């Protein structure tokens, strides 16, 4: 099926921000609700609008085929452009997030799977080869597989076949899904065969993330308390200068920026789901000064807190009418959505 046919199909495109952001934990780990007995999923997302997804990483492997427009990906501290028809390959150790141009919503088909799906029962060592493209990703890795290679079109068709088999509850359907997935992975293995990196890249990055684990645990429990560079560095046993470099190398953001993004994400949830005052919310998420909270919120969300509350509250109140208008238009023609 061509991209145009996917776009025009009668399908409910989910908002990527709404689905993904609530699942991101303090350590920036996006936890996808897999069926752990067979951890693979195919979803249909829109990216864009007012909100941007927090920088995050995940334990699963991700393939995203872009059906319309362009997405800019922040991967660690660099930006990568994905154009219509391209496939992007994201492993489990790099912090990243996508966003669309202002005022646009771009459609994408996303495949998520845990490496255990391929590794389970593997006695030959083949799993390491299948997963190679996801485990050699360093700071220069070419994440985008251009449309001209033909790999994206092939992968898109196989994603469609995988989606049709899910949830895979019989042995036949599970074998079928794994076969289609391996066909995608073989194409990627061939595409990246000349990229001269090793699995040691993956192991080093995993170790670096684990070293920051105690700090992420502390942030989850005490994000509303003052946390200085000095105290954060002490938690992981580093000097302040080493900690600054190390944290940005691992997450792609400075510690202060990371904490602000985390706190603002908490504030967005409270603004949308409670009637607490702006002052109460600013204090609850760790900002002692409401003015500073408003400044940080506007910079990261691109709208003032009160306006954000009005918009999200209106969406909540008008949910039935939005379902009947917006969703109906989306099903009729996804390209018509703003």
Image: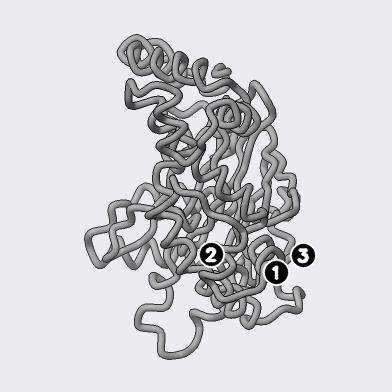
Question: With respect to residue 137, does 64 lie above or below?
Answer: above
Q: Is residue 38 left or right of residue 304?
A: left
Contact, mark 1 vs mark 3 (Cβ under 8 Å): yes
Q: Earlier in the sequence, mark 2 or mark 1?
A: 2
Residue drawn at 59 percent across, 37 percent down? 3
Contact, mark 2 vs mark 1 (Cβ under 8 Å): no
Question: Which label number is shown at residue 138?
Answer: 1
Residue indicated by mark 2: 92
CA–CA distance in space, label 1 to label 3: 5 Å
Q: Is residue 219 left or right of residue 230?
A: left
Specify the quadrant that holds the C terminus. top right
Nearer the observer, 330 or 15: 15
Question: Which label number is shown at residue 221?
Answer: none
Residue drawn at 69 percent across, 36 percent down? 70
Residue indicated by mark 3: 140
Question: With respect to residue 167, does 301 lie above or below?
Answer: above
Whether residue 5 is visible, yes or no, is: no
């Amino acid at each position: 099926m061509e991209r145009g046919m996917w776009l025009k199909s009668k399908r409910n495109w989910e908002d990527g921000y709404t689905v993904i952001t609530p699942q991101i934990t303090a350590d920036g780990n996006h936890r996808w609700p897999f069926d752990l007995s067979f951890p693979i999923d195919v979803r249909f997302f829109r990216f864009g609008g007012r909100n941007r997804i927090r920088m995050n990483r995940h334990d699963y492997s991700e393939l995203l085929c872009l059906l319309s427009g362009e997405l800019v990906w922040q991967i660690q501290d660099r930006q990568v452009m994905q154009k219509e028809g391209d496939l992007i390959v994201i492993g489990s150790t790099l912090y990243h997030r996508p966003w669309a141009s202002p005022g646009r919503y771009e459609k994408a088909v996303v495949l998520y799977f845990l490496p255990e799906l391929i590794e389970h029962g593997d006695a030959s060592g083949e799993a390491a080869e299948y997963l190679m493209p996801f485990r050699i990703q360093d700071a220069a890795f070419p994440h985008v597989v251009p449309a001209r290679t033909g790999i994206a079109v092939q992968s898109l068709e196989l994603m469609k076949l995988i989606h049709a088999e899910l949830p895979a509850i019989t042995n036949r359907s599970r074998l079928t899904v794994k076969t289609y997935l391996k066909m995608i992975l073989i194409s990627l293995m061939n595409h990246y065969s000349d990229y001269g990196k090793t699995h040691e890249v993956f192991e080093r990055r995993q170790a670096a993330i684990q070293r920051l684990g105690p700090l992420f645990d502390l942030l989850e429990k005490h994000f509303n308390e003052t946390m200085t560079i000095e105290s954060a560095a002490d938690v992981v046993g580093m000097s302040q200068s080493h900690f600054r470099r190390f944290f940005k190398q691992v997450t792609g953001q400075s510690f202060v920026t990371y904490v602000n993004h985390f706190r603002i994400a908490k504030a967005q949830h409270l603004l949308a789901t409670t009637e607490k005052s702006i002052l109460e919310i600013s204090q609850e998420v760790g900002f002692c000064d409401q003015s500073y909270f408003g400044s940080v919120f506007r910079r990261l969300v691109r709208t003032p807190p009160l306006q954000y509350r009005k918009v999200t509250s209106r969406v909540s109140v008008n949910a039935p009418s939005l379902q009947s208008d917006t969703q109906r238009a989306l099903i009729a023609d996804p390209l018509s959505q703003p």
